[in-house]
Image (tube, rainbow, N blue to C red):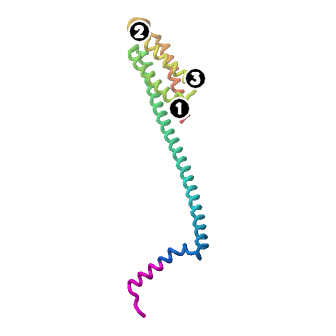
Amino acid sequence: MAAATPTANLALQSASSASLFSWPFQQTNQLTVAGVGFWLGLAGMALTLAGFAMTYWQLRKTRTAAQEAKLAVSEVKLRIAQYDAVHDLSEAEYALTMTSAHIGNGSWKDAISTYEDVMRASLRVKTFVSDKIDNDTNAEIDQMITRIGRFCKSVDLSIGGAGNLPNPANSRDIIRKQSALLTRVRHLLSKKV
């Protein structure tokens, strides 16, 4: 038997590859090609539908994760606001105690200074928690802030020689009531946590 030459091998390979790519176009294979195409089309459609389903599932999962992240951020903001409010309540309660002591000692200028600290801390508390406490308590905080402003103005005028100093016993009684209000606000905030 004669050995095949390299050009003969190349011709044989190209003839077999030509027949590999030409069989779908031959008349005798037309039904086979149609059947294979039909099944490949069905498989492609099934994969496409599966891909759409997977995409939809991923989108829902992403939306749920985004909503959970948004809720977590809201919760953190609420906790920070409550922490700030509790800190400001502590500051206001301490300043009320100091104001009462200053009034008892007759240190009216110091009483004004610490009472204004109460007013500033109460304003901060109100901005943090006004939507988390009832309307009556909000109104009481507003009245307390207004009363503190009037007290400070009255003492300033009295020190300047235009008016009388407030009654120390009445002032300390009002401060006790304000301290009870701040304690109630603290209790309301602790229930909201």
Q: Single out the residue that lies furthest toward the top.
A: 162
Relative vertical location of residue 135 with respect to residue 63 in this rendering, above or below = above
C-alpha distance separating marks 1 and 2: 37 Å
Look at the numbered disc 2 and give the secondary structure of its residue.
Answer: helix
Q: Does 87 lie within the magenta span?
A: no
Question: Viewer-nearest of labels 3 and 1?
Answer: 3
Of the residues shown, which amino acid type is indicated by label 2?
A: Leu
Q: Which residue is mark 2?
A: 157
Marked residue nearer the N-terminal end (3 or 2):
3
- The region drawn magenta spans 1-16
Relative vertical location of residue 155 with respect to residue 30 in this rendering, above or below = above
Marked residue nearer the N-terminal end (3 or 1):
3
Of the residues shown, which amino acid type is indicated by label 1?
A: Leu
| Residues packed near mark 1 inside 10 Å, few (<14), some (14 to 19) or many (20 plus) | some
Image coords of residue 50 (percent x, y): 58, 59
Quadrant for the N terminus in the image: bottom left
| Residues packed near mark 3 inside 10 Å, few (<14), some (14 to 19) or many (20 plus) | few
Residue in the picture at 51% in, 45% down: 66
Image coords of residue 186 (percent x, y): 51, 29
Relative vertical location of residue 108 with respect to residue 6 in this rendering, above or below = above
C-alpha distance separating marks 3 and 2: 31 Å
Give the numbered dot on residue 136. Answer: 3
Look at the numbered disc 3 and give the secondary structure of its residue.
Answer: helix
Q: Which residue is mark 1?
A: 189
